[in-house]
């Protein structure tokens, strides 16, 4: 093993090559492809600081939080990985607190694929299913990350994610989620996905939805979920041009209801207006009676890298700072940790 005293390279030198639908760390993708991870001086320093300051007392959590809140998703992944390699345990063993604070810190100290597997586990355990936690994880994701998510879920819980969700969900939502979990979105090839094909798919989408009595859900869902990002944008443009005063978003709102509508809207809005969508997602965890603390924590950690754009969109859409909204709807050390994460970006 390379001596840490010879390590000079920093984790900020990592070049992110993964694209749309990818939230996981670049290093996670690299490991999945069989690469060996390099050592980085800043990661080694953080790992050693955590290890040396561990006392087994109540102050450990605050020390861990203070180190992790200023780190990127990439850096947190590498710290978790390096700590596990050196000390044969996860950083989450440090987290003793229960409640919202403990859950948020556990998320912050875990690889994002583990966090998402846990979200889906919680959403499907016990009485009822928390559908609003499921579709933000599954929709509009890359093929690689769908595969990594299914693999992680199997490793953590010994169960097949597709079978679990198929058994828990029903109706059109199950059709949408099952289509997304295939993880077989084709790459965009302009020789195949031509303007003529966009026009043809726009016609097919119209005939499956607004252009008929009732809805051909299988066809409608299939076109939406199986279209590469660029092609979906071109379908929407062709749809709006031919069928005046409407577009794909309006078609979904007219043809689907409930969680199925929400899941399809999440997918297409992540393509058309991602930061406005995520601003709405944050707001949805805080509006009405009570706050969905688990959903809010998941959003803050999962979309950490996009927080500057989300905060800007939120201010434009809701007329106030996201941090002020969070401050007013949360309390105690949980609020303090949330705001430390949000304000770090």
Image: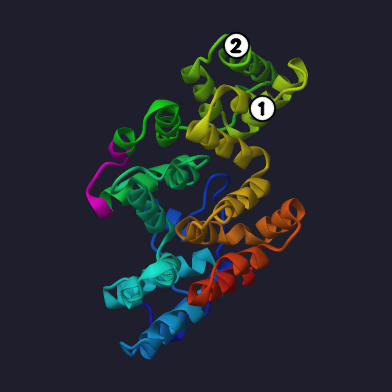
Q: Residue furthest left?
A: 158
Q: In this view, does 296 lie above or below 198?
A: below
Crowding at label 1, few (<14), some or many (≥20) Cα neighbours within 10 Å? few
Where residue 309 sits in the image (x, y, percent)?
69, 57
Asked if the residue under mark 2 is in contact with the one under mark 1, i.e. CB atoms within 8 Å, the reply is no
Q: Residue at x 54, y 36 (%)?
A: 262
Query: Extreme front residue here?
Result: 289
163 in the magenta segment: yes
Which residue lies under the disc numbered 1? 250
Q: Name the residue under label 2.
A: 207
Labelled disc at residue 343: none
Bounds of the magenta span?
A: 156-164
Q: Within the image, what quadrant is residue 224 found in?
A: top right
From the viewer's perspective, is residue 49 above or below residue 344? Answer: below
Q: Is residue 329 visible?
A: yes
Q: To which quarter of the image does residue 105 belong?
A: bottom left
Where in the figure is residue 162, as x and y percent of width and height? 32, 37
Q: Quadrant of the N terminus?
A: bottom left
Residue 136, percent across and down?
50, 45
Left or right: residue 130 versus residue 247 is: left
> Horizontal placement of 269 versus 8: left or right?
right
Main secondary structure of the magenta stretch? helix
Mark 2 is surrounded, within 10 Å at the Cα level, by few (under 14), some (14 to 19) or many (20 or more) other residues, namely some
């Amino acid at each position: 093993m390379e001596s840490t005293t010879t390590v000079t390279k920093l984790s900020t030198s990592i070049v992110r090559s993964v694209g749309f639908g990818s939230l996981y760390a670049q290093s996670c993708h690299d490991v999945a492809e069989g690469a060996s991870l390099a050592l980085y001086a800043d990661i080694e320093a953080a790992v050693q600081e955590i290890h040396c300051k561990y006392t087994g007392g109540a102050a450990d959590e605050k020390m861990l939080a203070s180190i992790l809140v200023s780190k990127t998703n990439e850096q947190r992944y590498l710290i978790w990985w390096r700590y596990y390699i050196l000390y044969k345990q996860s950083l989450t063993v440090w987290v003793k607190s229960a409640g919202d604070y403990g859950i948020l810190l556990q998320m912050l100290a875990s690889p994002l694929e583990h966090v998402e597997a846990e979200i889906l586990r919680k959403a499907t355990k016990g009485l009822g299913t928390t559908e609003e936690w499921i579709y933000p994880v599954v929709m509009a994701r890359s093929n690689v990350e769908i595969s990594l998510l299914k693999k992680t879920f199997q490793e953590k819980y010994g169960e097949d994610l597709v079978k679990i969700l198929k058994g828990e969900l029903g109706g059109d939502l199950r059709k949408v989620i099952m289509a997304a979990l295939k993880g077989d979105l084709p790459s965009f090839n302009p020789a195949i996905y031509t303007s003529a094909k966009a026009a043809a798919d726009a016609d097919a989408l119209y005939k499956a939805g607004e252009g008929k009595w009732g809805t051909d859900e299988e066809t409608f869902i299939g076109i939406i979920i199986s279209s590469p990002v660029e092609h979906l944008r071109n379908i929407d443009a062709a749809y709006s041009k031919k069928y005046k005063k409407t577009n794909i978003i309006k078609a979904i709102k007219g043809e689907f209801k409930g969680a199925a509508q929400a899941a399809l809207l999440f997918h297409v809005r992540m393509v058309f207006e991602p930061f406005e969508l995520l601003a709405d997602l944050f707001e949805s965890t805080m509006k009405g009676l009570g706050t969905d603390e688990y959903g809010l924590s998941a959003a803050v950690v999962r979309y950490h890298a996009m927080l500057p754009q989300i905060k800007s969109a939120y201010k434009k859409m809701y007329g106030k700072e996201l941090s002020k909204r969070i401050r007013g709807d949360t309390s105690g050390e949980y609020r303090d940790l949330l705001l430390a994460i949000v304000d770090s970006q």
